[in-house]
Image: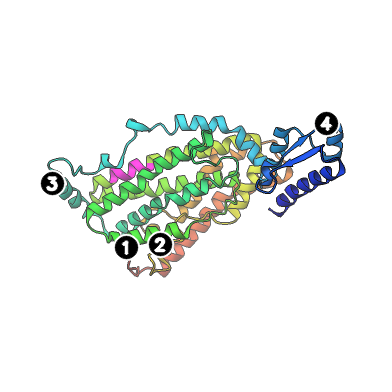
Amino acid sequence: MTIIKMTTSIMMMMLLLCTRATTSAAFQLTSISRRPASTLHVSVNPDVITTKEYEDICGTSFDEDLLHTRLQATNYLYPKHVEVVEDLAPIAGAMVDEILLETGDKAWQPQDYLPDLSQPGWEDEIKEMRNQAAQIDDDLLVVLVGDMVTEEALPTYQTLLNTFEGCDDPTGDTDSPWARWSRGWTSEENRHGDLLNKYLYLGGRCDMRSIEVTIQHLITNGFNPQAKKDPYRGFVYTSFQERATKVSHGNVGRLARQAGDKNLGRICAKIAGDEGRHEKAYQTFVTEILKRDPDGLLNVFGDMMRGQIAMPAELMTDGVNKDLYTDFSDVAQRLGVYTAIDYAEIIKHLVETWDLENLEGLSSEGEKEREYLCRLPERYRKLAERSMNRKKKVNEEVVPKSFSW
């Protein structure tokens, strides 16, 4: 960031020096005091100084559009990555049309899966819904609540999308492919928390106020997946996380059906289907980045895998239990909803989806990252198996945890 600020400052100083080096009629710096550096404009009197002379002194053309573009470029932390994702804009547009198909009347809505309280007989529908929901044990209910809280923190995730350089929505209604993708994705994801929230409310088994407090805390606390404004990091992260969410919702639905709650099984299957479509889109973005900048993408992917993929609800708390996320994730692991094995399997899936085994034309550094990433799934699987076996030996007797939910 320091380098970027210095670059802009140096250009401004050069322009000011140019102004002093010529007559006052030659240059006029317009509205510098209130404009950011990226909108600085310079007008030149061609009768006093020629274009060639200006370029020789300042190193840039006095053409207004070119200067604006040049100054704007210095605002990016990842100019090459921005160039690549801008080249992907038509593909992002296609994803809106081909992946986000469910808009308007064609889109499913939470109410499609819930009793309609405006229609006769709704009391019987709720009774039947509650009879089925009563079959679910407390552990699975805890995981369902945790999943719902995670979905309800959607404002945080849309904010995150808008930090990815080159694919943000600067005005809120920008008509670019990336902005339309971001808003379309958000509109579909918004249904998930709404539906699960209403299901839990109508089920009558949860302390909804405590859950609402947890949601508010999570949104307030925020979330940092270490994307660092880098669109490459952002798309690797979302490729991973969408699949993880699909796995979790799918497994909750499977366990619900086994317990006898067909309603919840349908709900979770529908949500998992959305996550699967979104996963496909983000993984397609990465596939296209690999075609244009394989070394750059592998460097980012490898660096992220040397750390740990952050889960979106890691800062979850109900205001009382500071270890709430750990307790929730322990229950999810014990039930097999989302485990360390799943983490390893997702890495394996990404390596295979992006065909890293057969990626060619890399630099020596890129080849090292490719080899590291290709070996990683098996390594993670072995570590996960050892970790899970240790926990089984140490915790033969599960100590129940209490949840305010």
Please identify, in this view, whether the residue under mark 3 or under mark 2 is nearer the observer: 3
Residue 342 placement, left or right of 3? left
Closest to the observer, 132 or 13: 13
Q: Which residue is mark 1?
A: 210
Q: Earlier in the sequence, mark 4 or mark 3?
A: 4
The span shown in magenta is 265-272
Residues at discs 3 and 2 in contact (Cβ within 8 Å): no
Q: Residues within 10 Å of mark 4 (few under 14, many from 20)?
A: some
Question: Please, what is the dominant secondary structure of the magenta stretch?
Answer: helix
Q: Secondary structure at mark 1?
A: helix
Point out residue 90 in the picture as x, y percentages from the top left corner: 55, 29
Q: Secondary structure at mark 4?
A: helix
Residue 107 placement, left or right of 37? left
Q: Which residue is mark 2?
A: 330
In the picture, the disc for residue 124 is 3
Q: Amino acid at mark 1?
A: Ser
Q: Amino acid at mark 3?
A: Asp
Instruction: Calculate the distance from the C-alpha at mark 3 to the C-alpha at mark 2.
Output: 36 Å
Q: Which residue is mark 4?
A: 51
Q: Residues within 10 Å of mark 1 (few under 14, many from 20)?
A: some
Please identify, in this view, whether the residue under mark 3 or under mark 1 is nearer the observer: 1
Instruction: Calculate the distance from the C-alpha at mark 4 to the C-alpha at mark 3.
Output: 81 Å
Does the magenta segment cover residue 289?
no
Residues at discs 4 and 1 in contact (Cβ within 8 Å): no
Point out residue 192 in the picture as x, y percentages from the top left corner: 36, 46
Residue at the front extreme, as displayed? 25
Q: Residues within 10 Å of mark 3 (few under 14, many from 20)?
A: few
Instruction: Calculate the distance from the C-alpha at mark 3 to the C-alpha at mark 1.
Output: 28 Å
Q: Amino acid at mark 4?
A: Thr
Instruction: Calculate the distance from the C-alpha at mark 1 to the C-alpha at mark 2.
Output: 20 Å
Q: Earlier in the sequence, mark 3 or mark 2?
A: 3
Q: What residue is shown at x 41% (from left), y 61% (from top)?
A: 217
